Amino acid sequence: MNPKKVIRETEKYLATTTRDPETYPIILDRGEGVWLYDIEGNKYLDFTSGIGVNNLGWPSHPEVIKTAIAQMAKLAHAAGNDFYNLPQLELARKLAICSPGNFEKKVFFSNSGTEAVEASIKLVKRRERKYLISFIGAFHGRTFGSVSLTASKPIQKAEVGPFLPVIYVPYPNPFKNPWHINGYEDPNSLIDRVIEYIEDYIFAHVVPPEEIGGIFFEPIQGEGGYVVPPRGFFQALQRLARKYGIYLIDDEVQMGMGRTGKLFAIENFNAEPDVITLAKALGGGLVPIGATIFRAELDFKPGMHSNTFGGNALACAIGSKVIEITKDLLPHVNEVGKIFRDELSTMDVDDVRGMGLAWGIEFGRIYNRKIRDTVIQEAARRGLLLLPAGEGAIRIIPPLIISGEEAKKGLAILKKVISDATKLT
Ligand SMILES: Cc1ncc(COP(=O)(O)O)c(C=O)c1O
């Protein structure tokens, strides 16, 4: 089918969501490793990983495909919340053991990031602790609980509501923050500023700490612009939370599973959250899966929470294999990550931030969306797929299996597109 017709028909039959024919008039056909092909046979180097899902490449890692086929031939669905099965036990045990936090943990399985977040809300919100805190720029999903926590774009909350009672506080964003709006703030000074804001303003004037159930955060803000907080921030946040008996919920849906060079992104910050959410890459690019890992003492009452597909044998067998392969890949992620850091810092952009294979670049102190969008569209025309993040950033998240050579190839395209962008805009 002609690509223009596919786009026309898609817009006719599918709900309006986040697809944008201007940015991506590409009809994907197949993938191989870090390469994607459209229905006309054009080839693209992928710096998007299917928005953080295909960390092990396209369509998936050969070992994961093998595991999936073997499990499918045996037992795929298995209603994990109603019947026992071995793959869900194995994956839950693995997640409990390899996640940070030296305490007893349990796992709830679901089918997406938003569901993993919904479960975590039910774990920490209590009648007497009905308020939640989240950060400006946060993205936690689009169902009612998780969208209540989301604060990255007003459109995400347009026309619906009411929402859960959430107090939004500034994220320690060195590039743009309320204290120094269009210039760099020393990242370390932001730690105290944010903690004091919560303690001295929110707790003192808005809601007392004993009415707050949880503080939700992303270890690096994803949809908010690939914002990396100062290294000491989450330890400071943890001290504050523990002082007042508030739970910390670490949303690793986008940054987890090796993306930052550690299995869990929060390991880069030496903090121990009470709840961790995962989804996206845990499914190896083959199946939807969500996981909520939590302090055992927070467990639901029987019947309080469940679902149909969570803990299905197929998704869980895949998840276990994904963890195994990802762990082995971590040294490679850090190695190739250095190429990204070095190359990106030679480009004509105003900010480069990231770790492992999670990078953000930004144009203009006052967000320059026009240059950003031009770079993304032009890069796609030249065979490199990129994604926007936040108001003016580009996120660079190749599959973790990318070779040094492939990384350099993509970065060379990006560098040239950026240097041409001022002429193009
Ligand atoms: C940090 C974070 N949390 C939650 C979600 C929601 O995940 P899903 O789209 O699978 O519902 C996303 C999706 O991008 C995310 O990045």
Image (cartoon, helix red, strand yellow):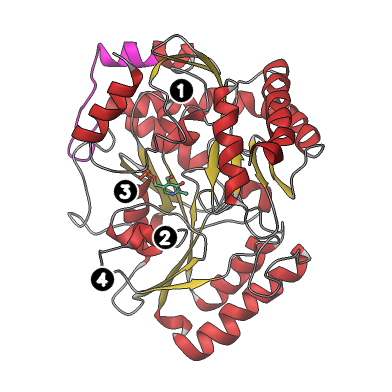
Q: Amino acid at mark 2?
A: Thr
Look at 32% across and 54% down and name the residue there: 119
**Magenta part of the chain:** 67-86
Decide which of tag 4 and tag 2 comes sooner along the chain. 2
Give the numbered dot on residue 134.
none
Split into 4 quadrants, where in the image is the N terminus?
top left
Instruction: Out of 117 and 296, give the one closest to the viewer.
Output: 117
Q: Amino acid at mark 1?
A: Lys
Q: Are marks 4 and 2 in contact (CB under 8 Å)?
A: no
Q: Quick one: SS at disc 1?
A: helix
Above/below status of 15 relative to 172 = above
Q: How many marks?
A: 4
Q: Nearer the viewer, mark 1 or mark 4?
A: 4
Q: Amino acid at mark 3?
A: Glu
The quarter holding residue 296 reads: bottom left
Q: Which residue is mark 3?
A: 115
Decide which of tag 3 and tag 1 comes sooner along the chain. 3
Q: Which residue is mark 1?
A: 321
Q: Nearer the viewer, mark 2 or mark 3?
A: 2
Q: Which residue is mark 2?
A: 150
Q: Quick one: SS at disc 3?
A: helix
